[in-house]
Amino acid sequence: MQLLNKHPESLLDVKMHYCPGCGHGIIHRLVAEVMDELNIRTKTIGVAPVGCAVFADTYFNCDMIQGPHGRGPAEATGIKRAKPDSIVFSYQGDGDLASIGMAEIVHAAIRSENITVIFVNNAIYGMTGGQMAPTTLMGQKATTCVDGRTAKQAGYPIKMSEMLATVDGATYLERTTVHTAPGVLKTKSAIKKAFQNQIDCKGFSMVEILSMCPTNWGTRLDNPSEATKFVAEGMLPVFPLGVYKDLKRD
Amino acid sequence: MAEKKLMKGNEALSEGAIRAGCRFFAGYPITPQNEVPEYMSWRLPQVGGAFVQAESEVSAINMVYGAGATGVRCMTSSSSPGISLKQEGISYAAGADLPIFIGNIMRGGPGLGNIAGAQGDYWQATRGGGHGDYRCFVMAPNSVTELANFPHKCYEVSFKYRLPSMVLADGILGQMMEPVEFTTPEVDPKTLTEPAWALGINNGRAKRIVKSYDLKEGGVEIMVNERVQRYKAIEAAETMYEEKMLEDAEIAIVAYGISARVSVAAMKLARERGLKVGLFRPITLWPFPKARIVELSKRIKHFIAVEMSLGQMVEDVQLALNGRSEVHLYAKPGASVINAEDVCNVIEKIVKKGAKEYAAAK
Amino acid sequence: MPKMEVDVDKCKGCYLCIQVCPKKCIEKSDKFSKSGYYPALDSKEGCCIACQSCARICPDLAIRVYK
């Protein structure tokens, strides 16, 4: 009997603090598997955000830095420019990347920084207890819009992959999901491409990954179907999956 | 004989940082320090370094936070409002024990203020500015040559004790041109040993984390207390100041930076008028040269703080003296330039009237 | 015979694995673990086809698939 799925070396074998059914654990594992397969673990430096994934700095088995909310792309820029031989990734949630960090992500794309961004989009703020995110859906309830998001009060959800696709410096942008097993596989190959692009010095790559947050969506923690249904029926129409940019660049 | 070169303050600061081993700079344009990023943009690539014009001062300090975490000598610069934007990043760097280097070419404030030189950021520089319990090593040059040579000391201290460092200058120093002599040695970063905490290509060694948090109970207390020990060591070993004509002085001007330059003229004018005035110039603002001021107070009974602010450094003089001598103030905020005649007149009034506090006369 | 095994110390009882298993091989335990969750059970005898869907979606690396 052969074990088919070894624990990736790029992830420490520790219990992670994420809620039952949260997508972060899946995505951490995929990034780690890719780091193993591309053999980049010993030269990777990851940037952990502020948000539920703040503890990514303790989970990944490579050099890590944890910095201010939203500033991951700027930190990654500094690291990559100071140590160009390293592989640098910034792991961010939707508040980190699309709210407070909006300037940093856009300008990292403008500069076509040769970094890899993992953008976890679960349409809500997790760590701080369920406030509205820039990607929260119309009518979706959150603690700062208890009757549901309205256009008059809070505008409309931002589509980051679509928006960054207009930036010439963005090389590769793909939106995937982890609410199904095939989605997880697709996410892994997108992450792998985003890292390979960095190895090949192709410029800015980002994978936007739709993810579950049962706790703050108010869906059952012991029945994942409510959460996966929210992704399938609520999020997919607003955030269609697919490749939004894929430049070859010489 | 060392070569002297006529340089503008901002450019001397930039060249000085590069000579001291700086190989990464991120900054954003803001008057009166624009020559710093401009100079860095073409000079750094010449020495194999990297320059980024960041989209904001916030982004710049975070780029420096990242680059600094790899052990590279790095720098950001700005002027007052931009330094305000950087405070969170500086706090993070202090909390992560990173030796990043910041240049502040002060201008009039608060708010947009004006674009002329001022000294209104003393509190911001020495009282944190950012949140939490921490200190930065702060040096105040008073000449273009000092601007050129202080980065070397800043990098030495900040790497040795693992804290952010700052050169606190102002728009006058930044813009003026003087002959510069580089008296500090040139540092080739390739000869430096990589610090034991630096992130990078690890080739199988244990992973390293650069972070500023500890959520366990008592964790941050332990971190801060350990830092306090390093701060005490810095106070004991790295305090710097300069004295002029204090041997027989009855009144000591306390001034730093550009105010110290004016105060030299004021001191000489006062001496011509028969007043025994000397100058005590703090060079490190943190650590503030408290011990030396206390020592001087044994025979000097009047100290007058002279600064281009509403009166910020004067509080450190008062704290240090703790009532031992009289403390007076000549303060001119809003980037209005002080002049020797005014300072001298105020000193005369103090001597004649014994006035405690004296705001600038219009 | 392929099979999947659950590390009950890591399992948080989210049951994504149950949801994605194409052969309905996984059931919930009725005993709670040290962590206070009712973990997923190892695959039923002879059921598993080693498609690894469960392992791929498990957020806690609690599943091992053998073939």
Image: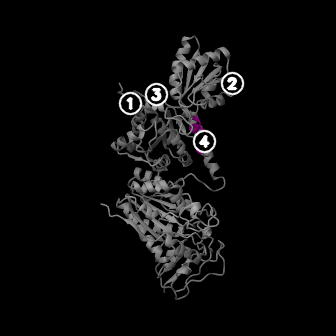
Q: Tell me the quarter of the image containing the N terminus of chain B.
A: top left
Determine if the magenta segment contains residue B129: yes
Dot 4 lies on which element?
Answer: helix
Check if mark 2's residue and mark 4's residue have beta carbons within 8 Å: no
Query: Which residue does the image show at 59% across and 68% down from the upper left?
Result: A140
Label 3 belongs to which residue? B143
Whichever of callouts 3 and 2 sits on the residue coming sooner in the sequence is 3
Residue C54 point in image, percent of width and height:
52, 78
Instruction: Count neighbours of disc 3 (C-alpha within 10 A) and say few if under 14, some if 14 to 19, many if 20 or more.
Output: many
Label 1 belongs to which residue? B7
Which range is magenta? B122-130
Whichever of callouts 1 and 2 sits on the residue coming sooner in the sequence is 1
Q: CA distance from mark 3 to mark 4?
A: 32 Å
Hey, what amino acid is under mark 4? Gln
Residue B46 point in image, percent of width and height:
33, 42
Q: Residues at marks 3 and 4, common chain?
A: yes
Residue found at the far right of this picture: B323
| Residue C1, numbered label | none
Horizontal arrangement in the rendering, residue B279 relative to residue A32 (left or right): right
Hey, what amino acid is under mark 1? Met
Label 4 belongs to which residue? B229
Residue B79 point in image, percent of width and height:
49, 38
| Residue B324, numbered label | 2
Dot 1 lies on which element?
Answer: strand
Q: CA distance from mark 1 to mark 2?
A: 42 Å
Q: Is residue B1 visible?
A: yes
Check if mark 1's residue and mark 2's residue have beta carbons within 8 Å: no
Whichever of callouts 2 and 4 sits on the residue coming sooner in the sequence is 4
Q: Is residue B137 above or below residue A202?
A: above
Dot 2 lies on which element?
Answer: loop
Q: Is residue B251 above or below residue B2?
A: above
Q: CA distance from mark 3 to mark 2?
A: 31 Å
